[in-house]
Amino acid sequence: MAIPNSMEELNRQAALLGLSFPCGAPAVLARPCGLGAKTAPNRLVCQAMEGCDGTPEGLPGELTRRRYQRLAEGGAGIIWFEATAVMEEARANPRQLYLNQKNLDGFRRQAEEIRENAFRTNGYAPLIVVQLTHSGRYSKPRGVPEPLIAYHSPLYEKNAPIGDDRIVTDDYLDRVGEALVNAASLAAQAGFDGADIKCCHRYLNSELLSAYTRPGRYGGSLENRTRLLRESVEGAMQVCTADFLVTSRLNVYDGAEYPYGFGVNPDGGAAFDPAEPAWLLGRLSELGVRLLNITMGNPYVNPHVNRPFAVGPYDAPEAPLAGVGRMLNGTAALKKSAPEIKLICSALSYLGAAAPQTAAGYIEAGGFDFAGFGRTIFAYPDFARDILREGGMKKEKCCVCCSKCSEIMRAGSTPGCVIRDKAVYGPIYRTATGKR
């Protein structure tokens, strides 16, 4: 099936699959939303899309600054600043951003630039939330795999098992927690509005959620498996001021059967089971979390789950709209379990120009509170401005979900949109992949 790009086409395709999606007025997306002491100026979110284009010291590079200038000018109410490592060995590549005391001023300048560019163009500034990460299984600080894992998983290691010496100890996880808390404090000092204790897409914190077979304080029980996330969130809240947003980009479903996936029934099957994720949302709410960014799947192993594609690295086992429906309806189910938490959805990019009306329909129905756009921001950085000023997105500017940005990243280079930003990323794509 092709990307819908209109509500009529979305409804037609959905009916063939026995699905339905709500439709609302895009004006809903222009409404401000209070988040404690802070207010997001609208309901549109630029998701954390890593450009892998920082400096060796971990600072934003030329392409990084270009990307955030375009996003700032684009008008979204929240910019979820990309994955930023909290330890040197936690970097997913040698160009991943890395926040530390030595380069704090550089991050401060980046946050200031985002606000200045936004004010100059739109008359308001977005909230800026930095994503703090430990790459865990996907750590490549020197450009070659140096995995640090929570436990062995044959689903991910297959015929290339990782040595037992790469399983992190409880003491090491204690240090990771300290690093996350320290980085949240640095983020506040740098002028960010909030910090995301990243817990998604099978990076270390996320992998712990399914560490059913791990012994010790970080495995086995649900209390233990969520310990690093909960204690890091609590610690960050203690060291930052009350108006600083402590949040998480949270995987609520891995798409893998027990005991290798979170958000599934231990009795069998790989269908989404919201029981454990709902428990976790309740505990985070008790800590004072008021904003969560919901996602599913693993972009390295089953990208059809979290970023349904028109063209991808394999033949997906389901129609792309099935993945979109799982993400949006799964988020709505969790919203019912924790209505006090504002939720950001994912997987809208595949809907193309039908995305604003669909997101507005869910927001009007109380399914979630913010519309998050990931791949779209590479292709269409001013998507928010078009929605807010013109009432919709332009088909000719939308992401086509061709997976070329992911191809660049898998090839070890700096991802961007090869279709809509061809002058910059066309040569990068050809050099990285050897394709035309």
Image (cartoon, rainbow, N blue to C red):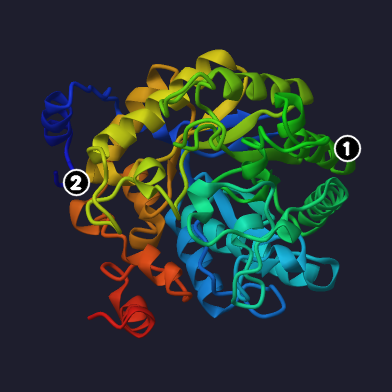
Crowd band around label 1 with a 10 angstrom C-alpha radius: few (<14), some (14–19), many (20+): few
- Give the residue displayed 54% in from the left and 32% down from the top: 252
User: Dot 2: within a 10 Å radius of its alpha carbon, few (fewer than 14), some, or many (20 or more) residues?
Assistant: many
Dots 1 and 2: beta carbons under 8 Å?
no
Lower sequence index among marks 1 and 2:
2
x and y percentages locating residue 256 in the rendered image: 46, 36
Report x, y in % for residue 80. Answer: 57, 50
Q: Where is residue 57 in the image (x, y as percent from the top left)?
A: 72, 78
- SS under mark 2: loop
Q: Can residue 47 be seen in this view?
A: no
Question: For the residue marked with disc 2, what is the amino acid?
Answer: Ile
Q: Name the residue under label 2.
A: 3
Residue 117 in sight here? yes
User: In this image, 333 relative to 429: left or right?
Assistant: right
Q: In this view, does 414 lie to the left or right of 37?
A: left
| Spatial separation of the CA atoms under disc 1 and disc 2 | 45 Å
Which element type, helix, strand or loop, lies under badge 1?
Answer: helix
x and y, in percent, of residue 291 in the image: 62, 32
- Residue 72: give its label: none
Quarter occupied by the C terminus:
bottom left
- Residue drawn at (77%, 34%) of the image: 227
| The one of 74 and 145 positioned closer to us in this rendering | 145
Give the residue pinned by disc 1: 238
Q: What's the amino acid at mark 1? A: Gln
Residue 319 found in image quarter: top left
Viewer-closest of 160 and 238 = 160
Q: In this view, does 33 lie above or below 202?
A: above
| Quarter location, residue 4 | top left
In this figure, what is the number of numbered marks?
2
The residue positioned 84% from the left and 43% from the top of the image is 240
